[in-house]
Image: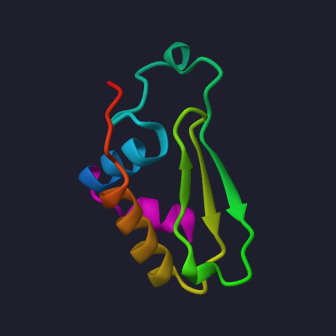
Amino acid sequence: YFWAVLESFTPEQRRLFLKFIWGRNRLPLTDEDWGEQRMRIHTLEKSNPNAYFPVAHTCFFHVDVPDYDSEEEFITKLMTAIHECGSFDRV
């Protein structure tokens, strides 16, 4: 569901997602600005995935995502995470 959900996001929701996963609200402008940094998505293995939220590792630009039962569940959990956990901004 991950890419389908991100593609459906508005620009503001994408900015909030970046802030959640990386602590920044925009992507680097050039390949050179990226350096070695690349977004990584990992599956968060849980016996009841719908009980958990995505976990961001902002220092590494990684996110651990439970294997939710539905796209709707993923959207709900991700939107809650990006709205409730974006408490700092590293511009």
Q: Is residue 24 above or below residue 35?
A: below
**In the rendered view, does 89 fall on the left or right side of 74?**
left
Q: Residue at x 50, y 67 (%)?
A: 4
Residue 36 forms part of the magenta stretch = no
Camera-nearest residue between 54 and 8? 54
Q: Please state, as top left, top right, bottom left or bottom right, where the N terminus lies in the image.
A: bottom right
Range shown magenta: 1-11
Dividing the picture into quadrants, the one containing residue 13 is: bottom left
Q: Residue furthest toward the top?
A: 32
Name the quarter where the C terminus is drawn.
Answer: top left
Residue drawn at x 41%, y 44% is: 18
> Residue 9's x, y, as percent?
34, 61
- Most foreground residue, 24 or 29: 24
The residue positioned farthest toward the left in the image shown:
12
Q: Position of residue 74 (x, y in %)?
A: 50, 75
Above or below 8: residue 49:
below
Q: 56 above or below 69?
A: above
User: Eyeballing the image, is 76 above or below 89?
Assistant: below
State the residue at coordinates (60%, 40%): 39
Q: Does residue 5 belong to the magenta stretch?
A: yes
- Which color scheme did the rendering employ for the protein? rainbow
What main secondary structure does the magenta stretch of the protein show?
Answer: helix
Query: At which x and y percent is residue 14?
Result: 35, 51
Q: Is residue 26 left or right of residue 12?
A: right
The image position of residue 52, as x and y in percent, is: 56, 73
* Rendering quarter of residue 2: bottom right
